[in-house]
Amino acid sequence: MGLGGGPGVRGREDGWVSGIYDAPEVYELACAYRDVSSEVDALERWFERYGGTPRAVRVLELAAGPAEHSLEFCRRGAEVTALDLSPAMCARARDKARGAGLGLTVVEGDMRDIAVPASFDLAITMLNSLCHLLTLDDLVTHLRSVAAHLPGGGLYIMELAHPADYLTVAPRSSSEWDTDLDDVHVHVRWGGALDQIDPVSQVTMERVSVTVRDESGSRTVTDVVPNRFWTATEVTAALRLAGGFAIAGCHGDFDDTTGLEAPSAWRMIFVLRRDG
């Protein structure tokens, strides 16, 4: 299942990436298959392993959407800031934090220019949200902005789609799935074989459809979302151009045994350490 977490950058011609990202409750349901608690367990494990300290006190989530991972870090006692470009997503994250009695700071902003006057132990970008960075310049600018908000030894963990989803006959993740939550059924189609990738820009205009059925009826949200696919080689090149980071680890899943080359790898997760 390869989807972007929330718009963290303006689209072409400075337009909004809209539609599904203007319907945060529907987007949440589309992403409900994720085990956020277990994923944060992995992020905390990796922070201790690669960062050398037991826990991250200050956490920054970029392109956070409804900020599920941020909220989980808050529950565990961290000071957390969630950044997203979408006003609707930011409002949803604030409402969820307020309803749960959590002190989450929510900032509306672009992940290429992080206007947050603070430093963090850990920065994260989840759910392949870096797909919203459509050019190498965007990615390099983003990495430099993240580096400016981390001290020496701080970590940045990026979760991207696995390149096998685009470069092999058999993708590692599904473009269509169903989720049942109490009395709600959710059917999602996010991209797929009919959405052709531009071989020059590596951008796909992914057709998205999320249908929610409950006792009150059925609602469908559709969208067409630009999605840039990144290879490990390109990410490594962007890191060299940006400076400020070393690759501390790579994972193909939210465990400690699946590498990027493993046949079961379905994500491309980079753990970056800020140079001292």
Image (spheres, rainbow, N blue to C red):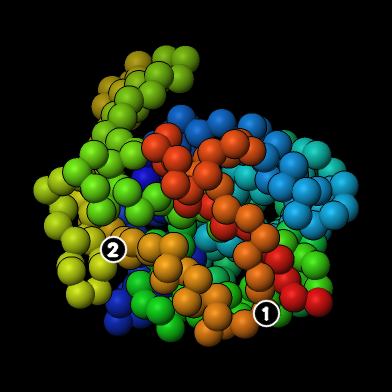
Q: Which residue occupies the foreground of this view, 158 or 87?
A: 158
Numbered mark located on residue 98 in the image: none
Direction from residue 131 to residue 83 in the image, left or right:
right
Instruction: Write down the residue under mark 2.
Output: 226
Q: What residue type is labelled 1?
A: Gly
Residue 190 sits in which quadrant? top left
Q: Residue at coordinates 15% horizontally, 46% vertically from top-left?
A: 193
Please say if the residues under marks 2 and 1 sit with CB atoms less than 8 Å apart.
no
**Residue 76, percent from left and from top:** 80, 39
Q: Which residue occupies the foreground of this view, 85 or 161?
A: 161
The residue mark sitting in front, 2 or 1, is 1
Instruction: Write down the residue under mark 1.
Output: 244
Looking at the rendered structure, the secondary structure element under dot 2 is strand
**Residue 40, percent from left and from top:** 67, 40
Residue 184 sits in which quadrant? top left
Spatial CA span between label 2 and label 1 = 28 Å
Q: What residue type is labelled 2?
A: Pro
In the figure, 8 relative to 51: above or below? Answer: below
